[in-house]
């Protein structure tokens, strides 16, 4: 039997608007915070009085737990309970909260978590939730829970720097949410469409939006639209232009080098990153992490830009793997239409039930997933969209026979025989060419990637780069990367630029700067005294 408050020394605890009289002996033996406090020569240890400023409901749960050893954890209390237990140094409770949240969280819980997570909460903070929403927005809006989210949650989501291809996708999400319950939600329409970043909507997309459902009935449509020169909606940045092209090189087994491509065709070094397997691989992570998926979706790496660390991701094979988590947290709540399974080299031939398909790739397109590969009967197939749980939890084939990428709804594939295929899974069309006969390519060294709707082919052995003009349907040699290290991948990634540390500083000189450094009274006059030239001469 655990002691009552009057069995020994009594301890008075003031927590905000509540005061407790508890057993000092019990709390010192159960809660490390009190044990350390009363072992030290602190004022509270002599007065038997403590003042706290903790969430009242969470602290009440901990008081009851101290006396009974029992506490109920749910999504409403898990974040404040973790924060309270962490402050009081109760490791058993923080561990239980951690296990509960990461095992049970799904999209259904998103409105609750958005209400309880703050910028300083420990288990999951607001930046982590915002980052999760931004990365997976196109999948989230296809889910059933999204349709039931309250207005405050939807507005909060649409304000974020979402990973989208076009602001038209924001328009579609708004209409979809309102149409689910139009009588009660239609009065929110104007407030929500102000969250479209009109400053970054070009004429063609604006025209498309104007003719879309509900928008064509809006009388004040023109007055809501804004422009960069006169922004009235707070369009902070272009959400459809957030990606950067990066390259990853292997320095050693435990070290990689990362470079970012800039518009001038130069690769800016970001430094060396060390392997750290203790980095969490959970689907919700801090905003300073990036997940780089490559090799037709078969491989991935999580990068910590702040601490310059990385870990390899287990992509498939269990509920804890990358795609397994995406299914459990998001895709299990999405009504996925029945998959189309068809052979690519013979579009008119129906898929045979006696054949067997294997996971060879995993492409994401507009919130859905597509797979392409070779079947048991050695036929090239496509499944769009992936509608079975088993595909997210199964295994890839041991050795891939394709490399590929997806741009909008078109899949670009190079197979083991170096044939180049362009696949439209929606219209079930496929074209096949052989444009690489003049190159001495080995399939094992090839990787297809895309960036800003441009198709890029990399030969990781020679480090040669080719680009594909989608309009003219023509491959062009574009250059060669000179780096002595092994090229692992080139990939287009949405980068947390504010968290990336530059190795050097660069500044464009003003006229005043130039005059100072050249030591001339007028720019463009004699450069005999130019300090830079003097330095070079030395």
Image (cartoon, rainbow, N blue to C red):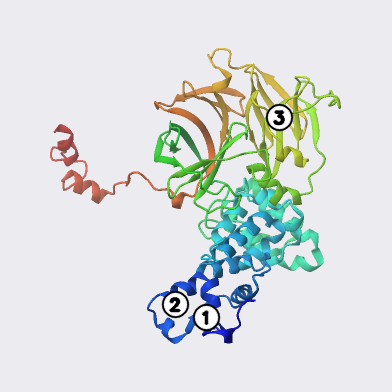
User: Badges 1 and 2: C-beta atoms under 8 Å apart?
Assistant: yes
Tell me, yes or no, if residue 233 can be seen here: no
Crowd class of label 1 (few under 14; some 14 to 19; many from 20; radius 10 Å): many
Which mark is first along the chain, 2 or 1? 1
User: Badges 3 and 2: C-beta atoms under 8 Å apart?
Assistant: no
Residue corresponding to mark 3: 372
Query: What residue is rendered at 40% in x and 34% in y?
Result: 266
Query: What residue is rendered at 16% in x and 37% in y?
Result: 535
As drawn, 34 above or below 181? below
On the image, which quarter does residue 96 sit in?
bottom right
State how many labels appear: 3
Q: Residue 320 carries which label?
A: none
Q: Which of 394 and 129 is in front in this view?
A: 394
Query: What residue is rendered at 63% in x and 72% in y?
Result: 65
Q: Nearer the viewer, residue 58 or 415?
A: 58
Q: Residue 38 carries which label?
A: 2
- SS at circle 1: helix
Viewed as shown, does residue 428 lie left or right of 77?
right
Residue corresponding to mark 1: 24
Residue 231: horizontal and vertical position, in percent?
54, 60
- SS at circle 2: helix
- SS at circle 3: strand
Crowd class of label 3 (few under 14; some 14 to 19; many from 20; radius 10 Å): many
Crowd class of label 2 (few under 14; some 14 to 19; many from 20; radius 10 Å): some
Give the CA separation, mark 3 to mark 2: 64 Å
Residue 226: horizontal and vertical position, in percent?
58, 59
Tell me, yes or no, if residue 131 can be seen here: yes
Residue 21: horizontal and vertical position, in percent?
56, 86
As drawn, 440 above or below 152? above
């Amino acid at each position: 039997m655990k002691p009552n408050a009057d069995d020994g020394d009594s301890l008075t605890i003031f927590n905000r608007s509540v005061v407790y009289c508890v057993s000092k002996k019990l709390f010192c033996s159960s809660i490390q915070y009190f044990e350390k406090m009363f072992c030290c020569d602190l004022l509270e240890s002599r007065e038997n009085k403590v003042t706290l400023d903790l969430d009242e409901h969470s602290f009440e749960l901990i008081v009851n737990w101290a006396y009974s050893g029992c506490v109920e954890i749910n999504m409403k209390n898990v974040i404040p309970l973790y924060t309270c237990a962490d402050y009081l140094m109760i490791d058993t409770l923080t561990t239980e909260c951690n296990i509960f949240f990461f095992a049970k969280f799904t999209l259904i819980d998103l409105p609750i978590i958005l209400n309880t997570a703050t910028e300083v909460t420990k288990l999951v903070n607001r930046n982590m939730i915002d980052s999760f929403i931004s990365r997976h927005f196109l999948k989230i809006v296809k889910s059933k829970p999204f349709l039931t989210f309250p207005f405050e949650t939807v507005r909060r989501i649409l304000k974020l720097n979402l990973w989208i291809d076009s602001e038209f996708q924001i328009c579609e999400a708004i209409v979809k949410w309102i149409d689910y319950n139009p009588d009660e939600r239609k009065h929110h329409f104007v407030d929500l469409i102000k969250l479209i970043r009109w400053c970054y909507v070009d004429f063609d997309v604006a025209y498309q939006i104007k003719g879309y459902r509900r928008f064509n009935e809006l009388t004040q449509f023109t007055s809501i639209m804004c422009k960069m020169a006169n922004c009235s909606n707070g369009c902070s940045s272009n959400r459809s232009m957030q990606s950067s092209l990066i390259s990853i090189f292997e320095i050693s087994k435990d070290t990689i080098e990362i470079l970012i491509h800039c518009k001038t065709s130069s690769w800016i070094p970001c430094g060396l990153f060390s392997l750290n397997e203790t980095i969490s691989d959970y689907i919700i992570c801090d905003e300073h992490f990036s997940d780089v998926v490559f090799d037709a979706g078969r491989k991935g790496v999580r990068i910590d830009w702040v601490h310059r660390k990385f870990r390899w991701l287990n992509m498939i094979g269990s509920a804890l793997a990358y795609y397994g988590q995406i299914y459990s947290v998001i895709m299990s709540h999405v009504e996925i239409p029945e998959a189309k399974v068809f052979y690519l080299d013979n579009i008119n031939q129906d898929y045979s039930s006696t054949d067997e398909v294997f996971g060879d790739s995993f492409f994401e397109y507009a919130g859905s997933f597509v797979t392409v590969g070779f079947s048991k009967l050695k036929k090239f197939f496509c499944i769009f969209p992936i509608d079975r749980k088993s595909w997210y939890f199964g295994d890839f084939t041991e050795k891939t026979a394709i490399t590929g990428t997806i741009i909008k709804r078109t899949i670009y594939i190079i197979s083991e025989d170096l044939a180049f295929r362009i696949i439209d899974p929606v219209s079930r069309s496929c074209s096949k060419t052989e444009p690489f006969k003049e190159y001495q390519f080995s399939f094992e060294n090839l990787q297809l990637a895309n960036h800003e709707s441009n198709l890029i082919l990399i030969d990781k052995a020679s480090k040669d780069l080719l680009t594909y003009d989608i309009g003219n349907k023509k491959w062009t040699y574009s250059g060669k990367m000179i780096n002595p290290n092994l090229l692992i991948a080139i990939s287009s990634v949405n980068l947390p630029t504010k968290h990336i540390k530059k190795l050097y500083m660069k500044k464009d000189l003003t006229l005043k700067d130039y005059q100072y450094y050249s030591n001339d009274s007028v720019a463009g006059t004699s450069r005999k005294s130019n300090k830079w030239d003097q330095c070079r001469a030395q």
